[in-house]
Image (spheres, rainbow, N blue to C red):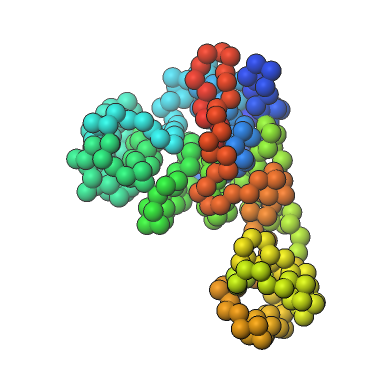
């Protein structure tokens, strides 16, 4: 795999605050690299250094062989950047803004065709202010792709997007990978990361705490488990005794059995619930999920698409440049 993005011993400071502390990571062409972490972990600062919008305090960053700050003009023709809340003027229309952005690149995609690909052809004449949040996200993605980037930095691409839109966006990201584009994806949707990413980097407190393929990270959590939904407040001690395995109520009405989902265990579980006249809402057996790895490494709990601490203020930047909100 050819390296597209290389971050080596990166440190980013805001006064006395160290946002990124000796971080190293790589992203390859023809692959999706997901960068995960709780708010304030240093993801935005790291990616802004890769995009050339922030100068590292120390360390080295290379994107397609270029220094993102010193070679910023050359780099802008090779990368696409999707930010949450692109903040376009309310009167801008999708077809007009895409045509405008197309003029910045030597070989852009066809704006009309791109609008079709992101499912906005029917909204081409609507203004930005009249687009839904999900439609604005899709337009932001189109703006990141209009210049045929070799490397695409995508921040929460499916946040606030409905199911149909999420499936469309994930399909487009998979197509980018198949076309040889390096996709660097920042998301709080761990299901999205697990299904899309070829490589995952988990950052916490400015340090990479884990890195590898989804399967590599899942192997960090040993053992199988069974999860099921039922009425809240079941007698987990009695159920543990009947199953011969520890049962815990992980959240209201969501139970975890620390054992493999063998036919015997599942039969015993359903029999016990039947004895108690309790309905089984759902049943999932297998290895632990990426959520479990993320929780153990960072101590954070996230729901798909719901970043914890989303209202946290951005870290102040004494340099005077506008810091990106640390939500990636």
How far across and how far down the image is residue 231, in percent?
Answer: 60, 72
**Which one is in front, 328 or 28?**
328
Q: Residue 273: which quarter of the image?
A: bottom right
Q: Is residue 25 left or right of residue 188?
A: right
Q: What residue do we see at 59% from left, 49% from top?
A: 302
Does residue 188 lie above or below 7 as drawn?
A: below
Q: Is residue 54 left or right of residue 263?
A: left
Whether residue 1 can be seen here? no
Q: Residue furthest left?
A: 125
What is the count of numbered marks? 0
How far across and how far down the image is residue 96, in percent?
Answer: 23, 33
Q: What residue do we see at 48% from left, 47% from top?
A: 177
Does residue 263 lie above or below 135 as drawn?
A: below
Whether residue 256 can be seen here? yes
Assign the C terminus to one quadrant of the image: top right
Q: What residue do we see at 66% from left, 28% from top?
A: 20
Assign the N terminus to one quadrant of the image: top right
Q: What residue do we see at 77% from left, 72% from top?
A: 237
Q: Residue 260: which quarter of the image?
A: bottom right
């Amino acid at each position: 795999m050819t390296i597209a993005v290389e971050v080596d011993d990166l440190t980013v400071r805001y006064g006395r605050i160290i946002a990124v502390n000796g971080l190293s990571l790589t992203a390859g062409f023809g692959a999706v690299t997901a960068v995960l972490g709780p708010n304030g972990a240093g993801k935005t600062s790291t990616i802004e250094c890769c995009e050339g919008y922030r100068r590292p305090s120390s360390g080295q960053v290379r994107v397609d062989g270029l220094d993102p700050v010193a070679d910023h003009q050359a780099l802008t023709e090779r990368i696409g950047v999707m930010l949450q809340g692109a903040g376009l003027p309310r009167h801008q229309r999708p077809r007009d803004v895409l045509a405008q952005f197309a003029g910045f690149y030597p070989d852009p995609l066809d704006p009309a065709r791109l609008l079709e690909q992101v499912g906005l052809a029917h909204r081409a004449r609507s203004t930005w202010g009249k687009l839904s949040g999900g439609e604005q996200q899709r337009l932001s993605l189109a703006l990141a792709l209009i210049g045929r980037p070799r490397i695409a930095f995508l921040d929460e691409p499916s946040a606030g997007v409905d199911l149909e839109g999420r499936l469309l966006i994930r399909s487009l990201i998979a197509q980018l990978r198949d076309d040889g584009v390096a996709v660097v994806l920042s998301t709080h949707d761990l299901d999205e990361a697990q299904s899309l990413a070829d490589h995952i980097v988990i950052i916490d407190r400015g340090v990479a705490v884990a890195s590898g393929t989804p399967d590599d990270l899942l192997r960090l959590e040993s053992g199988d488990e069974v999860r099921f939904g039922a009425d809240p407040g079941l007698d987990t001690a009695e159920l543990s005794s009947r199953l011969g395995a520890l049962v815990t109520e992980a959240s209201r009405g969501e139970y975890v059995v620390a054992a493999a989902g063998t036919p015997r265990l599942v039969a015993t579980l359903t029999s016990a619930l039947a004895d108690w006249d309790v309905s089984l809402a759902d049943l999932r057996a297998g290895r632990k999920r990426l959520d479990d790895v993320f929780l153990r490494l960072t101590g954070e709990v996230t729901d798909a698409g719901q970043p914890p601490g989303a209202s946290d203020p951005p870290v102040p930047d004494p340099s005077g440049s506008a810091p990106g909100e640390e939500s990636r």
